[in-house]
Amino acid sequence: MGKAINIIIIFCLFVFLTGFKQTGGSTSGHGGMGEIAAHDGIVVEVIALEGYTYVELDLKSEKMWIAAPAFKVKKGDRVLASKGIEMRNYYSRYLDRTFPVVWFVGKVEVVGKDEVVARPADAAENKKVASIKSPLIGTIKKAEGGYFLDELFEKKKELAGKKIKIRAKIVKASGSILGKEWYHVQDGTGSDAVLDLIITSKDKVEAGRIVLITGTLGVDRDFGSGYRYDIIVEDAELIVE
């Protein structure tokens, strides 16, 4: 029973923590996923496990492994996937294999000859998230005495473990996981793409709202099972504005 509960918890974390961030850019001419696809390649190898699928993609310039909750795919298919989380030197105890690099992704589309199939587990959720646009640069003011997200990433070492304040937009709310509410927030900052930060809180707020966030900045936080973050704001207080 305990093992089953652990599997469910890991699966829930996987679905949430590999959520994509919407940048407004386009990496493919394909409709829908093409507008946010970070990985676009041809399948050269498939490893199907119970509950998970690992796929090696030929991206022309290089080959890359991605992994997601189980989906149907075969060699020769074109796969479009959201950015997800990069894991280096990732060891899979189920495969007894170490991957130099594997991306755990939250949305996958398999493009066959005449069809596009969205992975059922995430199709409805990602459709909802896609409708919540990233804030434009300059549309969200810096919190008084606080920081923009790009400043948090730049100053993470000196701010580690300290109380910080930011103002941002919730672009994804995934409900309660391990007794906390988990959110993706953005404020429009970032050089090449809009930065995305994960927040945990006991406060429940719907996606799309602008919030004032006060919490502790965690740096290099490792939740196990491959879920590690450069920065994360934990146990935050959210005030809707």
Image (spheres, rainbow, N blue to C red):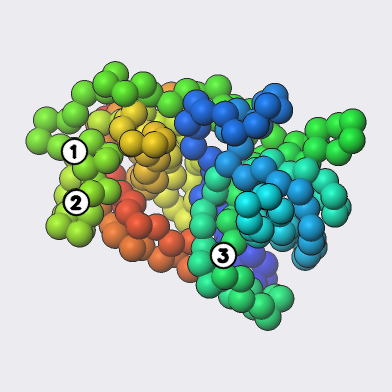
As drawn, the label of residue 101 is: 3
User: Mark 3: which secondary structure?
Assistant: strand
* Residue furthest left in the image: 145
Q: Is residue 55 above or below residue 29?
A: below
Q: Mark 1 points at which residue?
A: 147
Q: Of label 1 and label 2, which has the lower sequence position?
A: 1
As drawn, the label of residue 155 is: 2
Q: Do the residues labelled 1 and 2 touch (CB within 8 Å)?
A: yes
Q: Nearer the viewer, mark 1 or mark 3?
A: 3
Q: What residue type is labelled 1?
A: Tyr
Q: Which amino acid does label 3 sit on?
A: Val
Q: Which residue is at the front of the view, 13 or 191? A: 191
* Residue furthest bottom in the image: 96
Mark 3 neighbour density, 10 Å: few (under 14) some (14–19) many (20 or more): some
User: Mark 2: which secondary structure?
Assistant: loop
Instruction: For the N terminus, give its image quadrant.
Output: bottom right
Mark 2 neighbour density, 10 Å: few (under 14) some (14–19) many (20 or more): few
The residue sitting at 35% across, 57% down in the picture is: 230
* Residue furthest front in the image: 61
Mark 1 neighbour density, 10 Å: few (under 14) some (14–19) many (20 or more): some
Q: In this view, does 16 lie above or below 97?
A: above
Between the C-alphas of marks 1 and 3, the distance is: 32 Å
The residue sitting at 67% across, 43% down in the picture is: 40
The residue sitting at 36% across, 63% down in the picture is: 221
State the image quarter where residue 156 is shown: bottom left
State the image quarter where residue 213 is shown: top left
Picture coordinates of residue 170, whole percent (x, y):
40, 31
User: Mark 1: which secondary structure?
Assistant: loop
Q: Do the residues labelled 2 and 3 touch (CB within 8 Å)?
A: no
Picture coordinates of residue 66, whole percent (x, y):
65, 56
Q: Is residue 165 visible?
A: yes
